[in-house]
Amino acid sequence: MESGKIWLVGSGYMAIEFAKVLNELGKPFICIGRGGEKAEKFHAETKIKCTTGGLDEFLKSKPPLPEFVFVTVSVESLTSASRSLLKYGVMNMLVEKPGVSMPDEILELSKLARQKKANVFIAYNRRFYASTIEAQKIIKEDGGVLSFAFEFTEWSHKIQDLKKHPIEHNYWFLGNSTHVIDTSFYLAGGLPKKLNTFVKGKDQLAWHPASSMYTGAGETVNGALFSYHANWQAPGRWVIEIFTRRNRLIFKPLEKLQVQKLGSVEVNFAEGIDYTLDEKFKPGVFIQVRKFLDKDYKNLCTLQEQETSMRIYKKMSGY
């Protein structure tokens, strides 16, 4: 495959992680970045130089259309970058989560993608963890999910000191916490049809003024009951627990699967899971990239799916 067939837009942390996989797969690509320290670090870690000057400047040169594009720019630039690429005629895009800079921009971007008949996906790599894939097998064998619970507490004491654009901080729930929420509903097999939410903590965190405490419960479209909790003012972590007729599947941390079997109080790590790819690369990214390039889109989060999810996320977060 020629390098121009794949574009990697952005040169930061996630661009490096995608580049590692593309190099491993033997897929040449063009990296398009603004320049500066990120581009220098990208070159140092991947041995590939970025085309600098930014996406809009690159597009002015009228390059041939690529077959695939990975959009890894910072959150505040996601919408504008994706919009430019769709208008240019790109047909297959994998965009870093949450897909847009601010919640309401999802409507415009989704409409544009439909008009262009483009395939746009949101890069929720935790759908492709080895732990997630193994859990899906167990869930299928057990006849589906009966109920589930999840926690998405964020470490405010660390996040508040990160040098992030205000948009990324203000919408941290969308850009980060939805990793847990998306994985939970993905494993359960569907989004909520009923949802009761409770949100508190407005103006309690300077970096995230909208809210800081979240609880709720509901029922998914396929009948699974669920509940959730998160308190960004208190200690906690990300956790998902899935309940089937024979097993309690515990993701704590999300990268590893633990199992409690019916009739036992013992909790053990699931046996026979090959974590090799998740240890060599950023977890979930290798399989996600391979599926995208193979046009095996079945388990990827579509932009239209994210448009539906965004209404749920807004209700859960208080945005």
Image: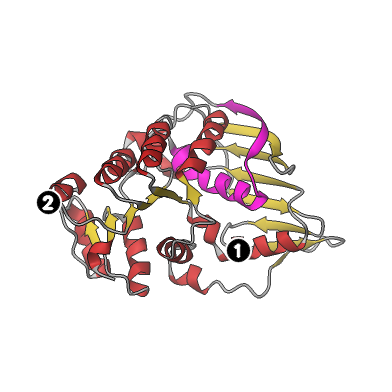
**Chain part drawn in magenta:** 172-200
Q: State the residue lying farthest toward the left.
A: 61
Q: Which residue is mark 1?
A: 133
Instruction: For residue 156, say whether it is visible.
Output: no
**Would you identify the image quadrant in which residue 195 lies?**
top right
Residue at (43% x, 50% y) in the render: 121
Q: Name the kind of residue labelled 1 in the image.
A: Ile
Q: State the residue lying farthest toward the top.
A: 202
Q: Position of residue 290 (x, y in %)?
A: 44, 66
Query: In terms of depth relative to the viewer, which is nearer, 258 or 206?
Result: 258
Q: Which mark is residue 223?
A: none
Q: Secondary structure at mark 1?
A: helix
Q: Position of residue 88 (x, y in %)?
A: 24, 45
Q: Name the kind of residue labelled 2 in the image.
A: Ser
Residue at (48% x, 65% y) in the render: 287
**Would you identify the image quadrant in which residue 153 lies?**
top right
Q: Secondary structure at mark 2?
A: loop
- Where the N terminus falls, by quadrant? bottom left
Crowding near the residue tagged with mark 2, few <14, some 14–19, many ≥20 C-alpha atoms within 10 Å: few
Q: Which residue is mark 2?
A: 61
Q: In the rendered image of this protein, does residue 282 appear above or below residue 303?
A: below
